Image (tube, grey):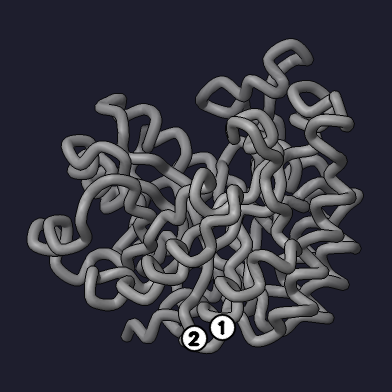
Amino acid sequence: MNSVRDTFRYEGPIFDAHSHVVDCDSLSLLVKTADEFGVRRAVLIVHHSKPTEIEKRYPERFIFAKYFSGTMLLSGDVDRAIKEAARMAEEGFTVAKMHFSPVWATRLEGSSPLSIDSTSLDPFFDFLQDENIPSLIHIADPDTYYRTRYADTSVFGTKEEHLRQFEARLERTPRLRIQVAHFAAQPEPHRLDHLGSLLDRFRNVVIDTGSARWMVRELGREPRRSRDFITKYRDRILFGSDCVARTTDRSYFEGRFHSLRMLMESNVLNVPLPFVDEDTVKTGGTFINGLCLPDRVLSALYWDNASTRYDIE
């Protein structure tokens, strides 16, 4: 791949508001690759390690997000979740990360997972709200998943149900500082109007661009419509790669950063995604169609919004 300076027009710093570490031995490769694509700060969702250990290696690089296990939270162990949230600051965490996905319907033995709007979860969300703890929440999955792996609605429910449940949570916890992963699970062109109405109604919500293949596949279907949407809501969208440090395959990180930057900055048409999108592998693959966002929008998306949210100069 060409250097970032040769390939992309934006030359400022980038804040990656959605990344993960599962294996600390792979984190150095994520950091090195991210550096080459202009990333200077990041929200890092920590799955097993301690923030203090990572902070020593990469001082002032990361805002740390605590992962609240779905096994704990969705099974209703709310008292434990609140106790863990109360320890976040002393452990070095700033953000609470939660994962509400239909996949939990088959992961919890002997019980069905609580929905995000369950009244049983009110004390936990009230605690986050009252303590002004920012949250990063995964609320649903791509439409392609609901047509395939979640096709049995008696087990998994529907995407529309899951989106309604999320809105019910927002109505009951209106002051919660929420970053919703993956364009609030609504980058599909036919969902953008609904997403816009959600952002209009709930001023406490921001969204991120996590998951390169999902964003490229859906936002690139109708580039003009997506460009208009992002331009309109430019102050409510954070750049996020959703890269996970658990591999030593450099192409994994390169492909995702490169694809997202090409989507946002270029006007390319029908450039093949540089890695496999399993959702389209049987239907011809996924292609990048650039949105060519204005410079002021790129600055907001890449740096200004996240740096303001996390008080970074």
* Amino acid at pointer 2: Asn
Residue at 69% of width from left, 80% of height from top? 173
Instruction: Label 2: state its secondary structure.
Output: loop
| Residue that badge 1 annotates | 129
Of the 4 image quadrants, the one containing the C terminus is bottom left
Q: Nearer the viewer, residue 48 or 59?
A: 48
Kindly give the residue lying farthest to the front in the view shown.
Answer: 110
At a point 72% along the width and 71% down the height, the residue shown is 231
Marks 1 and 2, Cα distance to the nearest angstrom?
Answer: 5 Å
Report which residue position mark 2 lands on: 132
- Residue 289 vs 232, above or below: the answer is above
Question: Considering only vertical position in the picture, is 40 above or below 278?
Answer: below
Instruction: Give how far across and how far down residue 130 sits, in percent.
Output: 53, 88
At x 15%, y 60%, the residue is 58
Disc 1 is placed on an element classified as: helix
Q: Residues within 10 Å of mark 2 (few under 14, many from 20)?
A: few
Question: Considering the image in quadrants, where does the N terminus appear?
Answer: top left
Q: Where does residue 98 sit, x and y in percent of width and height?
A: 53, 56
